[in-house]
Image (cartoon, rainbow, N blue to C red):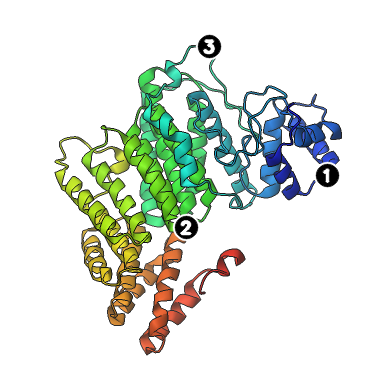
Amino acid sequence: MNGEPNTRLSDLFGLAGWSKGELARLVNRQAAAMGHPQLATDTSRVRRWIDMGETPRDPVPRVLAALFTERLGRVVTIEDLGFVRNGRAGKRRDAGNTDNPDALPWAPDRTAAVLTEFTGMDLMLNRRGLVGASAVLATGSALTSAMHDWLHSDPVLVADAPRLGDPLHAGPAGFDRYEAAPIGSQEIDALERSVEVFRRWDAACGGGLQRKAVVGQLNEVGGMLAYRHPDHLQRRLWGVAANLAVLAGWMSHDVGLEPTAQKYFVIATHAAREGGDRPRAGEALSRAARQMIHLGRPDDALDLMKLARSGSGEQALPRTQAMLRTVEAWAQAALGHGQAMRRTLGEAEELFVSDKGDVPLPCWMQMFDEADLHGMEALAFRTLADHEPAAATVAQHHARRALELRGTGRQRSQIFDHLSLASACFIADDPEQADRYARLALASIKETSSHRTWDRLREMYRLTGRYAGYPKTEELREEIQLSLPKMPAKRARSADL
């Protein structure tokens, strides 16, 4: 006990609306349900946790995390409560440290525990029909400051750490303890194949339909990582965890669960680095950067991309480096830095064509093909066109090329290409062509579960305002208004629809 209030727990306690006595009774009831009937918490203990900064012993932090998760309708972890994870009473890190709220970076054992706990909480929200969106995004600078030195150092696997005799069992809050057991290469082969299936589903239909399945699979892998396998198997398991965490994050972002998505990207970065795959860690950070740009925070995105590029190391293939530069260019475009954007895209093109294909691409890079390169260039130039209207013509060229090259099963990307092209045509004063491509997007957008496509449609809708007097454009505007799902009130206040 340090005598200072636990401000993070106090804030969550205020949001929950419980009295201290009520929370004490709930802790006892939940602990009994989790197999700890001997726990006896009272009002004075709750007061010490909140007002005096005392950290309760295990399993109380896990019990509290489960209670607050259910009450608030979003994932609440032990770190969110201002507690350390080691279970020692009376000691905790600074609960009010907003610069590094999750105490990044994590040790390998702790990464597996955080992964298992967070996915377990996420699944709880799914099962009970709650909405996990009411949390705060960390800034790009906060993440990069916390993770820079760690990402550039040599990873230490759980398997490389001193053996303590018994396997580590990770106990997610509010769920049965996963009984860690060894698995072999055949099981990991099957897990890797499942990742490919999930990735194809996401590309075709968006993140909403299969997100729960991906989170559940990631939760299982977290339990597997609790067992200390031989190094070569443990590295592959970390790779599976990184791929699933990126997918869980991307799907969460795709349906508007932004803080949840960011947490998965951080988990993916840890998992990739601990598996010895720095380029994979860099790609995970680039996803977090793309999320920031989408949310109107390009400065944060550039912070993340600086770390992603430097942290990827010399192992990154030219195509991976090209992909990273396209994300950086998009952030530069959002800031109106046209010269820097063009230079960065030029580097991306040179890197892409320099990849001779003599080294097989990792599975997570195989979807970044020439179509994706042009699609990202179209997005960058279309974004820059908000600052430099002349860039809209170049955006049209890249969007058309992307559409020519798109293969089957990439429906969401095709929608984005059509929306980039329609928006660029509106900016370039070509409403006839804009109408054509907007209708192509509108015809297929209902077949996906991607909220991001609707967000881009809203952006394009705002551009139609300058042609409101045109009969065809008026008809298009009416169709978009009828098609768009209703936004939450908070977002609707800042939108045109």
- Residue type indicated by callout 3: Leu
Identify the residue under disc 1. Answer: 19
Q: Does residue 18 sit above or below 446 in this rendering?
A: above
Identify the residue under disc 2. Answer: 295
Residue 323: percent from left, percent from top: 28, 47
Q: Dot 2 surroundings within 10 Å: few (below 14), some, or many (20 or more)?
A: few
Q: Does residue 382 sit above or below 257 in this rendering?
A: below
- In front: label 2 or label 1: 2
Q: Secondary structure at mark 1?
A: loop
- Residue type indicated by callout 2: Leu
First in sequence, mark 3 or 1: give its number.
1
Q: Secondary structure at mark 2?
A: loop
Whole-number angstrom distance, CA of label 3 to CA of label 1: 42 Å
Identify the residue under disc 3. Answer: 164
Residue 394: percent from left, percent from top: 23, 67
Q: Residue at x 40, y 89 (%)?
A: 469
If the image is split into quadrants, where does the N terminus sit? top right
